[in-house]
Image (cartoon, rainbow, N blue to C red):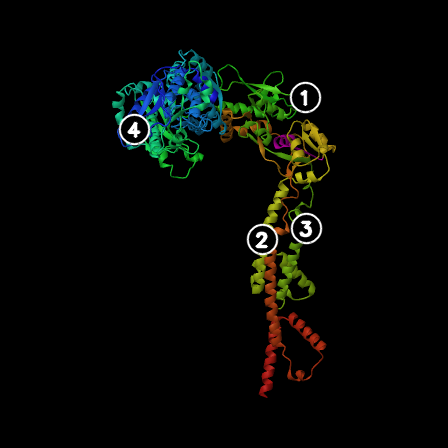
Amino acid sequence: MFWVLALLSSFIVLSGDVIVLSEGASSRPHHINVGAIFSLSTLYGQVADIAMKAAEDDVNSDPTFLNGSKLRILMYDAKRNGFLSIMKALQFMETDSVAIIGPQTSIMAHVLSYLGNELNVPMCSFTALDPTLSPLQFPFFVQTAPSDLFLMRAVAEMITYYGWSDVIALYNDDDNSRNGVTSLGDELEGRRCKISYKAVLPLDVVIGSPREIVDELVKIQGMESRVIIVNTFPKTGRMIFKEAKRLGMMGRGYVWIATTWMTSLLDSANPLSLPKVAKSLTGVLTLRIHTPESRKKRDFAARWKKLSNGTVGLNVYGLYAYDTVWIIARAVKSLLDSGANISFSSDSRLNHLKGGTLNLAALSMFDQGQQFLDYIVETKMSGVTGPVQFLPDRSMIQPAYDIINVVGDGLRQIGYWSNHSGLSVIPPELLFSKPSNRSSSNQHLKNVTWPGGGSVTPRGWVFPDNGRRLRIGVPNRASFKDFVSKVNGSNQIDGYSINVFEAAIKLLSYPVPHEFVLFGDGLKNPNYNDLVNNLTTGVFDAVVGDIAIVTKRTRIVDFTQPYIESGLVVVAPVTKLNDTPWAFLRPFTPPMWAVTAAFFLIVGSVIWILEHRINDEFRGPPRRQIVTILWFSFSTMFFSHRENTVSTLGRIVLLIWLFVVLIITSSYTASLTSILTVQQLNSPIKGVDTLISSSGRVGFQVGSYAENYMIDELNIARSRLVALGSPKEYATALQNGTVAAIVDERPYVDLFLSEFCGFAIRGQEFTRSGWGFAFPRDSPLAVDMSTAILGLSETGKLQKIHDKWLSKSNCSNVNGSASDDDPEQLKLRSFWGLFLLCGIACFIALFIYFFKIVRDFCNHHKKPEEEEATVPSPEVSRSKTLQTFLAYFDEKEAESSRRLKRKRNDDLSLKSS
């Protein structure tokens, strides 16, 4: 911004050694100046100074690279002083520098970027990686290393991978650390995690004693979260871990994640002292910007000892410092090769500030600055850090990090993170060519040695060490006190739900100090939505009791695994149906009885037709034949006893009918057994559907969610609803007709039916839910309690608690349930296929039989020649033929055969005479 430029320019004092280049300078200058602003007393400054000098020598070692021009890096030691950094940046802009490498910190980057914007001088930094340094706001500021946005994304995914949901951030109060933590918070929020506490320390440059650090660490000791993210600088970081170890915070249960400052510190440490340093940091997780292995990287690392004279080890920022110089050198080459001049001119906007002792005209604008910036961001090369290229949003291509575990003898790599594939034990460069797979099943890291030497992942939290017990809200019920109630004469809370909670607490691997706090006056049941809402306002730390898990509540709190199944059911008065001597008729519906009886007669009739001419048992007086038909119809044992007396067609029909009868009989027996052993009930209310369509009033329990459910979901008018407060009120209202039915949750109804007889559940549960314990959102205790409840279920302890409180009955027969019609009744539609099969068999048998008998009749009753001469009328002929056929049909087959034989003999005798 121009006002910043004007303000900062007021500090420039006119001096005689200021160099001002004239406009239109030579296109091939002998030296091309590049400024660099670092604090050489810091680790980053020391490494950057050595690496940039090496890069400068390498660029200038080839005279043809810049066609005779020399790149000159003008390093300035800012001595960790912001004012000096500003002054030197202005001086670089006086001396016609084409770019500035730096500044080292994000605080200075935010300030100096305004100067770069105004004077068209690009600034390239590999240490000021603040995510808020946007190219939209600061177009002339270029981050030549991955932004801390990706670093914080990697940390967030590590936190999610290990199942932690609550972390503490420890950082310095500067732009880089603060904005990095803000980005971490944003990343965690998208993963249902959060930063529960931000421990802010003074600036790294001013912190002199550990007092402020100790104060924050003591606060953290008393907090719930044990996952601590340290986003700071090497100097402050060393002090933090020194004091943490002294306070006993490097032991089991703690999780420490340090950002890239720690790997820079350890990579640059003296190899002889590294084991000692690492031992004091055992269990810490840290990250390092990933740089793929390459010959360039190995060669540069081999040169480092000579370049540094053993004063400092090479870290990843040394690699990025080297590549940053080459990025600028390649941009200079591209600018010169394009034929453009490198020229500077005065800023006309400063003319009105002339006067006094300030030489503001000395600040020159880089005429080719925009073109030069374009060449920088269009860089595409292979450096010591790997592929170097900028994406359209100015971020580095393929950002990735090594994930390091500090162990007793040094550093152990446990995996990688990349923006392409997330967490992996495979180097990212091997995955970039494959499709991105960020699924949870594809995220992997190697085993970790945690603080204290353990290998089991810490749960990441403990109860706050502040002496306060958990305040657990419980409903002060006026009815159904078997679930939750206050013991008379004491402050003790007891009941089924309380017993389950206490049993689950005992299964946890850590103590949970707590106290129960009653909610409600005890005169009527409290509103459970209000009880749950108190979790969100901090009134309670948990809610325990008969709390239904419903959608509205899950939006604001977390529930445990259900410890009992529940759901809304309909209860109505019933009468018994099986106290009758005609109960044996109930397995079949009337149509089923009618069709079965009809088929008995049909099958008997078919057998009579098939057997009448050949079987003596099917002949005789009509009365005898009717008895025979009924006997064959109803005696399924007939076929096996007299199979030799029945024709082949008759045996086939009887076999099929026997098959049908056996299936129907077995079904009838099973249904009748069920009817006689299970109490059958009757009521006008068959279930929720008939309840909705009726006009009767409906009762519900005071405080239950059933009221809103019936109004909102079932569209039952509020005027039909009647609030009831106790099981006794339930019974009275149902008996005197105040309500036609009651809708309540299954556990309450089961307890009601165990005490009051003459009522039953009608239909099925029409909602599915359960009861659970409620905790604030993202509470880790909810997860551990769910695991404990599952443990109770697997060991049978949960069922024992249920039997203790809820398995009782004052009724001789437990009230049952019935659906809209008796499920045991066998309906015709279930057996029509069998009847169809039997009918088809009868039809085919009759068809074959009549075909045969008609054929035989035609053969046996040919007209004599003398009769053929006399032609009677058609009516007489048909009548006579029918009479003859019926007589033939009624005649025994043996007699017909004998008569036919005599006729043939007579015919032969006549012919022979």
Circle 4 sits on which residue? 69
The answer to if 747 sits in the magenta stretch is: yes
Residue with the mark numbered 3:
590
Residue 180 percent location from the top left of the image:
44, 24
Label 4 and label 1: CA atoms lie apart by 94 Å
Q: Amino acid at mark 4?
A: Ser
Q: Residues within 10 Å of mark 2 (few under 14, many from 20)?
A: few
Residue 841 placement: quadrant: bottom right
Name the residue nearer the viewer: 631 or 76.
76
Question: Is residue 798 visible in the rendered structure shown here?
Answer: yes
Q: Which residue is mark 1?
A: 523
Which residue range is magenta in the image? 740-753
Secondary element under disc 1, as helix, strand or loop, is loop
- Residue 614 in sight in this render: no
Where on the picture, by quarter, is residue 563? top right
- The amino acid type found where label 2 is placed reads Leu
Q: Is residue 839 above or below residue 418?
A: below
Residue type at mark 3 is: Pro
> Dot 3: within a 10 Å radius of its alpha carbon, few (fewer than 14), some, or many (20 or more) residues?
some
Label 2 belongs to which residue?
A: 662
Q: Looking at the image, is 405 positioned above or below residue 84?
A: below
Circle 3: element type: helix
Tag 4's secondary structure? Answer: loop
Q: Measuring from the top left, give residue 609's x and y in whole percent.
A: 63, 65
Depth-wise, is mark 4 or mark 3 nearer the camera? Answer: 4
Q: Quadrant of residue 701?
A: top right
Q: Earlier in the sequence, mark 4 or mark 2?
A: 4
Residue at figure coordinates x 37%, y 36% from the top left = 431
